[in-house]
Amino acid sequence: MTGIEDTASRFRELPFSRGKSRVDRDRLLRIATATGLLGVAVALPFALHTFFIFQTTMVLIYAIAIIGLNLLTGFNGQLSLGHAAFYAIGAYTAAILMEKFGVSYVWALPAAAVICFVFGFLFGLPALRLEGVYLALATFALSVATPQILKLSIFENWTGGVQGLVIVKPDAPAGLPLTSDQWLYFFTLAVTAAMYALAKNLIRTRTGRALMAIRDNPLAARSMGINNAIYKAVTFGVSGLYTGIAGALGAIVVQFVAPDSFTIYMSVALLVGLVVGGVGWLPGAFFGGAFILLVPNVAEQFSKGLSGATYGLMLILLMLVMPGGFGGFLRLISMAPKPSSATTKAP
Amino acid sequence: MELLWQQVAAGFASGAIYACIALALVMIYQAIGHVNFAQGEMAMFSTFLAWQLMQWGFSYWIAFIGAVGISFAAGIVIDRLIFKPVRAGPVLTQIIMFVGLLTVINSVAGFIWDFTSKPFPSPFGANPLFGSWLISTHQAVMIAVTFMLLLYGFFRYTRVGLAMQSAAENPASAKLVGIRVEWMIALGWGMAASIGAVAGLLIAPIVFLEPNMMLGILLYGFAAAVLGGLSSPGGAVFGGFAVGIIENLSGIFIPVVGAEMKLTIALLIIISVLVIKPTGLFSVNQAERV
């Protein structure tokens, strides 16, 4: 492809040169894809074995957590190695409310969301003064210390100490012909869809553009009148909220919380999911979620240390070869020269 | 009162080890301006190497020198293989690289040597001075201080040390005066890996040898390095002793939860120093040009 043709084809892709029909076609295509995917997602639990329903539910839960991390890291440029802590707080909030206070799981979720938002916001305040490496350091420390904090003997009445807490699995509402696994899957699916839509809208609005401006050039963002401090702290809170909801759902689905499930390696796993899916690309969260669930399953069959090694190698190789992750891969395919100039771009 | 002094002395002993880890972190920070999240795992791997050499029948000191030497080479290889290609990349990329390295080393060590903990001999005999501490306070302090003086002298008075500093501060200008910037960075990695190896060999008799042994220690190393300032070797040593003493004293003076909160205390130290004085106690403020 010569330079002129290249420019011409790119010019045709600019929005103002598009015909109205083309925009409509893009939109239709996108709606069709979304409807199709949702249809498959709804049909899935009727076709799968119980264990696979559980696994698909976990993929969705990880996806919510990765969306949260993506909002913070991918769109706002603040790296967190401590998201296992938010996941843990969400999980423990749900577990304690359900087991000690008899709250319904439906109400445990918003409670976990609020608590994680507040915690994230509060952690975000000192984090305002930290950039890059220092923020990574502080969140790393948070993640390493989390299991020990959860084991503290003064909280043992609520947290159950080292043993953790067991949760009773909620049943499907009376009248619905579903097993509790299927019901939990649909519940999670609904929450995931809602959270995804919210994140998508957040990114599209003025607020989202402000977040990205802060990521790309904090100084320019500030001089345009964006209040960097409040945006960054609130983003930390929102990110914590997403991860907390994921944690609460995870606790309900797994029916068990214990301090040692929320180690630094969980934070690393979420980071792997983010990088594999594509930093700054929301749908990537689902690919990332599937990756971090499936890889340990496969790798642990061969050797105990293998899943960690795969995670690490994946991080290093992706950063070296394809920093865009799966999203970047899709974009690369869609940008490959084709006979017709009408190329679809990844959203 | 006697208990207090005993705890302070024990704090010095553990502080010396934190100081070594902090020194290694400072080395990398001097070389590339980043915090090495994989430092603890690198030290752990070096310690396993020494253990393996001893299993093969070498004496302690040969294994010691062997492990430190191999670590030096490995540090250079890691830099050339993993970090050189992303040198110009964003901070995020580099931190992800460190995290990836941490995970890989941890798993590979578990893969080769298993996740069970192994006893590790101490060079100073098995006659403890303070409870379970196998290395005496005096020796530990001597090691850390010697290291600090050596590093200080290296950075202040030798050609290579000065070249390394200038390569980190202003790579373009350093290149113009004929410094081979890339090799200076690789050298920094090698030295950091070696210092980490020494720290690992010192701590191994106390915490037992296993792939996850360095995670908590690394956190204290971070706290020490941040407290002293990431670009100051003297500060790192001071920070190491301070963190060691704080850790031991909080164990007896904070009621009920003192002994269970060790990692939390490191977390609190890191966050409060970063918030109140991000450059640490001994670093100079660096103005950023906008």
Image (spheres, coloured by chain):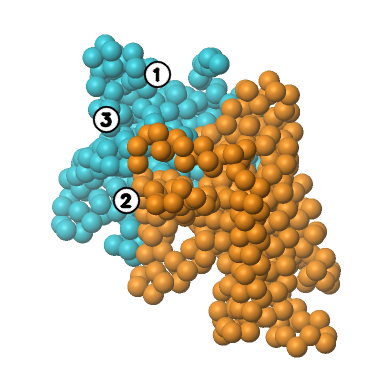
Against B107, residue B243 (above or below) is above
Query: Which colour denotes chain B?
Result: cyan
In the image: residue A185, left or right of residue A297: right
Mark 3 burial class by Cα count in 10 Å: few <14, some 14-19, many 20+? many
Determine if residue B218 is in view: yes
Residue at image position (29%, 62%) is B112
Percent from the top left, x then y, of residue A329? 44, 52
User: How many discs mark residues in the rendered view?
Assistant: 3
Residue at image position (72%, 67%) is A190
* Quarter of the figure with the N terminus of chain A: top left
Say the numbered circle drawn on residue B249: none
Query: As rendered, which of B100 and B137 lies closer to the eye?
Result: B100
Label 3 sits on residue:
B187
Percent from the top left, x then y, of residue B233? 41, 25
Mark 2 burial class by Cα count in 10 Å: few <14, some 14-19, many 20+? many
Q: Earlier in the sequence, mark 2 or mark 3?
A: 2
Say the numbered circle drawn on residue B169: 1
In front: mark 1 or mark 3? 1
Amino acid carrying label 1: it is Glu
Label 2 sits on residue:
B45
Amino acid carrying label 2: it is Phe
Chain that the image shows in orange: A
Against B67, residue A44 (above or below) is below
Residue at image position (16%, 58%) is B56
Q: CA distance from mark 1 to mark 3?
A: 15 Å
Amino acid carrying label 3: it is Leu
Query: As rendered, which of B86 and B120 lies closer to the eye?
Result: B86
Provide the chain ID for the residue under circle 1. Answer: B
- Give the quarter of the image for residue B179: top left
Q: Earlier in the sequence, mark 1 or mark 3?
A: 1
In front: mark 1 or mark 2? 1
